[in-house]
Amino acid sequence: MSTPDVTVTVIVYNDAERLVRAVDSVRRQTHANLEIVISDDHSTDSTPEVARRLAARDPRVRHLRLEHNSGGCSAPRNRALEIARAPYLMFLDSDDELPGNAVELLLRAHRARDIDFAMGAVQRIRVDNGRRSTWMPHLVAERRTLDGIEADPRLFFEHLSTSKMYARAFLDRHDLRFPEGIHYEDQLFSAQAYCLAKSFTIIPEPVYRWYVAPFAASESASLSNQRHKLANVRDRIHVQHLIDAFLAESGHESLREDKDYKFLKHDFRMYAGDLPYRDEEWLSSFADLVTPYLDTLAPGAFTRLPRAERVVVQLIRDRRLADARLAARGLGHGVAPRQVTTDGDGRTYWGAEVPQSDRSRRELDLSELELDTCPFPGAQFRHEITELTPGRGACVDLTVRTYDPALRLPVGPHRATLLITPGRRRLQVPFRLSPVRPGVFEGHVRLDLAAARLPLQGFAGIRHPVLRLEHQGLSHTGLLLAPLTFPTSTTHVPHHRLTLEPEGHGPGRLQIRWHPVGPTARIIRPLAHHLANPRVKNAARLLASALK
């Protein structure tokens, strides 16, 4: 057989169902002179039989089966690398796939100039709703060739090994292989590749399709979605130590602050969003694991974080765990603390007391947010549902408490509106917030979801109510937090099944789900979808023009 231009390794373990899709995406590549190595990490399902059938169907496919299960991605990739025959290498996971011209595009970048690897955009596809987005789009927005990671240290955030095509000579020259026996091996491998490469090219076109199941059951969730396991925390911190050691040993210590910022902004941030859902024991163990590593990070990395994220980090370091859970709700959505404290110098701090240490005062200082003077539409409030009682039909009675820590609202009752928009039509439910004590207001509202005007073709989707305040002719719309757990209830409104449930992730809002039923689901929606097809619309326009 002639030497292939590219070897694409497809690693697999007990994934017979999706392996065919992954391999077929490589077989259909516009650049056909390639080989496909299916590297099976000793699967116990029908994966070996499927792999053998794929190899029998196409001579470019080879099947490699490890003698023992390694429990990770590194060993199957490394074993395949040993037998790969091409001068350029790519890696694909069995639950993902390659766009049709991925190999052609990356190989063209290599042939255009002498580079160590080429990388492109990663398209993330949510398996639960089909939504597509680009992973780290700002890093792959334009074609460019960099002479080392120092030219753009932000690339530490793009740590996927699967979005790249490597020159075999580059990997062999540095003996660069995937570290075995650890998780999050991509982070270490990619950090090493970035630092060791003399030059690499970035192209803006998609070269990888990453299928993401963010809310998969724990037993089937990907490693990155197993953040509820403390072992997962240990694994992430362990690989960070390995990266730190590599940076020091390889003479790249100047990149440490950028790498530390990436850890805080990406890795720690993923756990921070989950903190409201963790119990006291888990939070205590998490603080024990992460605090010693946080103490090693470059001080400049903390200052680059948004203030709300700095607050959560510091509350964990101070072991104010209940406060950390409160601060973590609504991260990124401008949710205020329940209370702030001002010292004698006029500095404003998160929480009910002035922090004791210099570091805590620095990190928990909210003065820069100008909570008491910023324009009202951008002010920070905290809206919480404290009681939730399903009523008759599609009604739900809510008790809503609003915290105004900067005392922006004058004493007295205030008009508020609950807003929810299924489809394009907004349901508005006005109610009154009455003062409980300075900075705290409470009100009661009945939300009748049967009053929501749904589109003729029905509405299938999820919505979360928000709360709007009005003051001196200005309005402010903010997130409405709900109890993290409450019984799910299901009812019916015309042509729909309606479900009220806790969000179960993220901020923890009241989640309302519409699901069309009956003729709306069977007839009207498929017809509306067909009529919305651009070809049908164009044909209708042509017909209308002809009849004029």
Image (cartoon, rainbow, N blue to C red):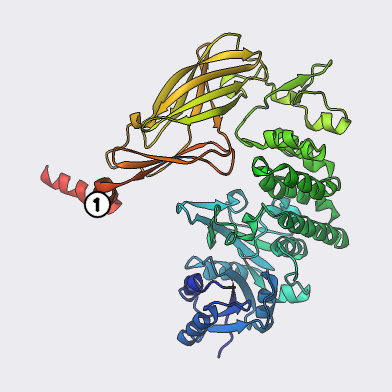
Q: Is residue 503 left or right of residue 522?
A: right
Q: In this view, does 348 lie above or below 463?
A: above
From the top left corner, tell me how far across and down residue 220 is, in percent.
Answer: 57, 62
Q: In this view, does 510 lie above or below 78?
A: above
Q: Name the residue under label 1.
A: 536
Residue kind at label 1, given as amino acid type? Val
Q: Is mark 1 on a helix, strand or loop?
A: helix
- Tally of numbered tags: 1
Q: Which residue is drawn at 29% across and 37% down?
A: 494
Towards the viewer: 123 or 118: 123
Residue 63 visible in the snapshot: yes
Check the picture and name the quadrant holding the C terminus.
top left
From the top left corner, tell me how far across and down residue 400 is, in percent.
Answer: 54, 24
Check the picture and name the quadrant holding the N terminus.
bottom right
Towards the viewer: 61 or 443: 443
Q: In which quarter of the image is residue 312?
A: top right
Q: Is residue 538 left or right of residue 308?
A: left
From the top left corner, tell me how far across and down residue 364 is, in percent.
Answer: 78, 30
From the top left corner, tell me how far across and down residue 150 is, in percent.
Answer: 76, 54
Q: Is residue 43 above or below residue 358?
A: below
Towards the viewer: 111 or 312: 312
In the displayed image of the protein, which residue is found farthest to the left? 547
Q: Is residue 231 above or below residue 324?
A: below
Q: Residue at x 54, y 77 (%)?
A: 45
Q: Quadrant of residue 481?
A: top right
Q: How crowded is mark 1: few (under 14 residues within 10 Å), some or many (20 or more)?
A: few
Residue 204 visible in the snapshot: no
